[in-house]
Image: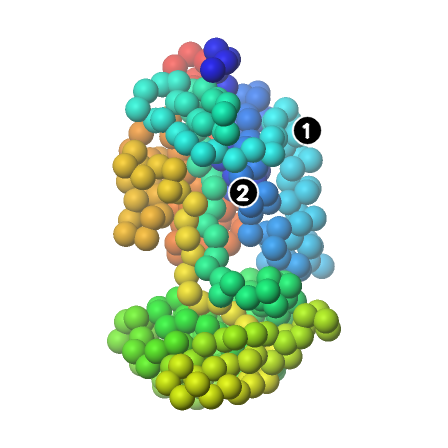
Amino acid sequence: MSDFVHNTVILGSGCSGLTAAIYAGRANLKPLVLEGHEPGGQLSLTTMVENFPGFPDGIQGPELIEHMKKQALRFGAQIEVKHAVSADLRQRPFVIGVGKETIKTRTLIIASGASARWLGLKSEQELIGYGVSSCATCDGFFFGGKEVAVVGGGDSAMEEAMFLTRFASKVSIIHRSDQFRASKIMLERARNNEKIKFITDTVVEDIYDPRKKEVTALKLRNLKTDKVSELRTNAMFLGIGHIPNAKLFEGQLDMDKDGYLITRDYVHTRVPGVYASGDVQDRRYRQAVTAAGTGCMAAIEVEKFLEAEGH
């Protein structure tokens, strides 16, 4: 283990982590960013981003991340293609395990994000950003007047479906059961919306058409009858939740029942000097701009914390 101690280490290189790196870099803290297992976060899986301020014509997700990365590097951030596999927050400096290497740091910003749950289909992965999406708020606008589908049976699926009715001409909710995890009030709202149609006891087996780089239809199978059918649609939205990338901190930091980190005063965890920002602690908004905002907050808190300690 090296004796060198970093002022701050940032886990994650999405909107939140890179914003934190820009602010920490400008404060001359020389932050170390570990890119993580999904470099660039969910924006790297997004094609056109139209709701990030400052880009009136929109910007490609990977391009936005590249701009942020260059900005962070300009202010002295160090970015490494590494993934944290362990963390010891019991004493300071904190120790982060990266493969066989260990890194010491006075403070830690956890901006490791949350990964969308996917169905695991090959065609699904090929069509992410081309009609397959895990964020209706981000991409619903592109499907004005078109027919779309939402997969899921919980509150998030109902929320996605109701949001999409603002744009789409028809929304089909596809759920593998005829029982729903959604709260009664959310389910009732969806059932009362004339644009929403329910397809129950059904799973998606394939998505057409990766060759055309667009969603044209879904191959469905009814789990009770085994009957295979085709649903014509222009988009498929996943409403089956996200998995926060916080498993590393089980037993060390407070989490809710789904594994999201619980923060106080916006970005503080229960361990002094450890902060969490972005989707790893935000199960509600999950937007690039809100992730960037909490990344900024975390970096400012780090600066104040280190200043109080005389660093």
Q: Is residue 252 above or below residue 146?
A: above
Q: Residue at x 30, y 78 (%)?
A: 179
In the rendered structure, the answer to whether residue 162 lies left or right of residue 289 reads left
Q: Residue at x 66, y 34 (%)?
A: 71
Which residue in the protein does label 2 denote? 37
Label 1 element class? helix
In the rendered structure, the answer to whether residue 239 lies left or right of residue 264 reads right
- Density class for disc 1 (Cα within 10 Å; few <14, some 14-19, many ≥20) is few
Q: Residue at x 50, y 25 (%)?
A: 100
Q: In the rendered view of the protein, which quadrant contains the C terminus?
A: top left
**Residue 145 falls in which quadrant of the image?**
bottom right
Residue 213 seen from this side: yes
Q: Residue at x 57, y 37 (%)?
A: 35
Which residue in the protein does label 1 denote? 74
Q: CA distance from mark 1 to mark 2?
A: 24 Å
Q: How is the image coloured?
A: rainbow
**Residue 310 falls in which quadrant of the image?**
top left
Residue 144 seen from this side: no
Along the line of sight, the residue nearer the viewer: 150 or 144? 150
How many labels sit on residues? 2
Sequence-wise, the earlier of marks 1 and 2 is: 2
Label 2 element class? loop
- Density class for disc 2 (Cα within 10 Å; few <14, some 14-19, many ≥20) is some
User: As shown in the figure, which amino acid type bears the numbered disc 2?
Assistant: His
User: As shown in the figure, which amino acid type bears the numbered disc 1?
Assistant: Arg
Badge number at residue 206: none
- Tell us which disc is closer to us: 1 or 2: 2
In the rendering, at what x and y percent does residue 188 appear?
A: 31, 81
Along the line of sight, the residue nearer the viewer: 138 or 26? 138
In the rendering, at what x and y percent does residue 122 appear?
A: 59, 65
In the rendering, at what x and y percent does residue 60 appear?
A: 69, 55
